[in-house]
Image (cartoon, rainbow, N blue to C red):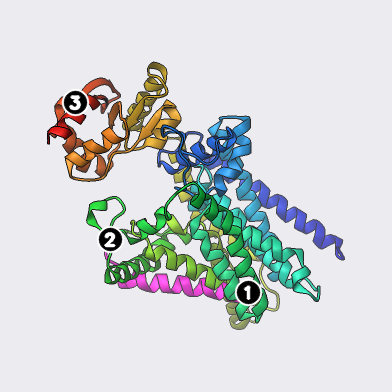
Amino acid sequence: MNNPEKFSRTWLYIAAIAAVCTAVFAYTFKPTLDMNGDTSQYYIYATSLAQGEGYTELGTPGHPPTSAFPPGYPLLMAPLRALTPSIVAQKILNGFMLFGAAMLLFLFLRRVVPQPLALTAVLVALLNYRVLQFATIMMSETAYLLFSALAVWLLYRFDTDTSPKWWKRPWFYLLVLAAGYGYMIRTQGITLPAGIVVWMLCVRKWRQALAFAAGFAVTTLPWTLRNHLVGLGPSRYLDQLLAVNIWQPDAGRVSFGGLIERGVDTLRMLVTKAIPNTVTPYLDVDYEAAATFGEWVAGAALIAVILFGFWRIKRYFWFFTAYSAAVVGIICLWSAPSGNRYITTLVPLLEIGLTIGIYALTDTVLRRRFQLRRTFSPLWLLIPAVLLAGGRIREVAAESRQPLPPQFSGFIDAARAVRKQLPPETVVCSRKPSVFYVYAGCHVCNFRYTADDEQLIRGLVDSRVDYVLLDQLGYAATWHYLYPAIQKHPELFGVAAAFGNPQTFLLRFDRTAAELKLRSE
């Protein structure tokens, strides 16, 4: 490097990022398994890969192949899972990926904005409570953030490579692979190549855009071919996209008009509530209440500042804008209430845009209004950022250290009892089958989400269920579907054991009697 002082300062800034990342990650670290279900599912798939069984459902008899989730994150987890079953170790791996993403974003930003501003923007992104929440619960968001940050850095390297023949630049092929693997981590990652293609078109890289789109399509072929060869149907995401409510299949599919109405409602929620509540986490909002005029003004102003920050990144404005718009567009199509859940991977970029935008506006005002000749250091922005983000970070830390609620303790106690007292071939029906499998190690399934009690019972029979778990986790499906079926057919469900307070019941399912009853009806 031509400037040794700048080189040493760069490493000093990277060390600062590492220190902050380590501190906030350790402070908010959650050592226990999160009960949302997806975390357990990723762990199960990583275990399957580590054991050499392929990408399969270990909790289902026969261990059938699956395509429920893309395989990218479990593939990253598998080498560590082969060494240790520790869930804590997997979460620490997420911490390294969080640092990697922050470092790559800094290495990109330092080339397009002053280094102190690049450092400030990345640290503000690291202090976001939502980013920290997902980094410590073994979810795919952090892994995707790493590969999306890698793609941004590779995009810059490809763009600034002076080789006259673009197809000979290694950065191009690495960019294709990074974007392709990002899609293999999260299907929402289709937005990343969309942003890259739009940027290439905007800077008149026509052939590169076409080649990139073709290369990205090639990276998805192995996964598509594998699913076809093992006889798996279309993606579950399409069915969920078209459902009126993914938790109530009986509600049917959404109409075109309903899809448009859903998109408008979700966009309103994102602009007025989710983005302000997440990017400026000191703002509390009521997601259930109608958006007020003040919320519209605040949301629009916030987005305007973010876009201005993207504009100050100059040549890469269209990538950041198109990518952000694509993510918002995908979320607007989704059928489940999302709140700020699905913008998590976009939040660091929004924080970066907001920080750069605020700095640029403040610097402009100070220069023009007060005739200042020297700009103020962007590092001063870290003081209000830390003060404003501190409350939410403390909430995340407090939540991570809380003991499990009694209803969850009963659920886990039931699973551990099954592991100790019943053979692994036992089939247990549970509302959270993947979580139950992690603790029980037996075969698991869910019940059918239908108000037709006969169909629900038939599903238990078809799944060869031996026991049914009636939990107190509070999920609506249990009380809308499972509990009424048990009440209508009490002779099929005998209490085998009860755990915790409130009680979680392990019910012995009389499959033979159920088969006879279904035949007679």
Alpha-carbon distance for marks 1 and 3? 62 Å
Q: How crowded is mark 2: few (under 14 residues within 10 Å), some or many (20 or more)?
A: some
Q: Quadrant of residue 277?
A: bottom left
Q: Position of residue 61 (x, y in %)?
A: 41, 32
The first of marks 1 and 3 along the sequence is 1
Q: Mark yes or no: residue 116 visible.
A: no
Query: Taking 462 as reference, is 50 left or right?
Result: right
Alpha-carbon distance for marks 1 and 2? 35 Å
Q: Which amino acid does label 2 sit on?
A: Arg
| Residue shown at 43% from the left, 40% from the top | 399
Residue wearing tag 2: 253
Q: Which amino acid does label 1 sit on?
A: Ala
The numbered mark at residue 513 is 3
Query: Taking 41 as reference, is 349 left or right?
Result: right
Query: Taking 485 as reference, is 331 left or right?
Result: right
Q: Could you tell me how many numbered marks the image carries?
A: 3
Alpha-carbon distance for marks 3 and 2? 35 Å
Above/below status of 321 relative to 154? below
Magenta segment, principal secondary structure? Answer: helix
Image quadrant occupied by the N terminus: bottom right
Q: Which amino acid does label 3 sit on?
A: Ala
The first of marks 3 and 2 along the sequence is 2
Q: How crowded is mark 1: few (under 14 residues within 10 Å), some or many (20 or more)?
A: some
Q: Which label lies toward us, 3 or 2? A: 3
Residue wearing tag 1: 209
| Residue shown at 55% from the left, 35% from the top | 53
Image quadrant occupied by the C terminus: top left
**Circles 1 and 3 in contact, beta carbons < 8 Å:** no
The numbered mark at residue 57 is none
Q: In which quarter of the image is residue 355?
A: bottom right
The segment highlighted magenta reads: 288-312
As rendered, which of 253 and 419 lies closer to the eye? 253
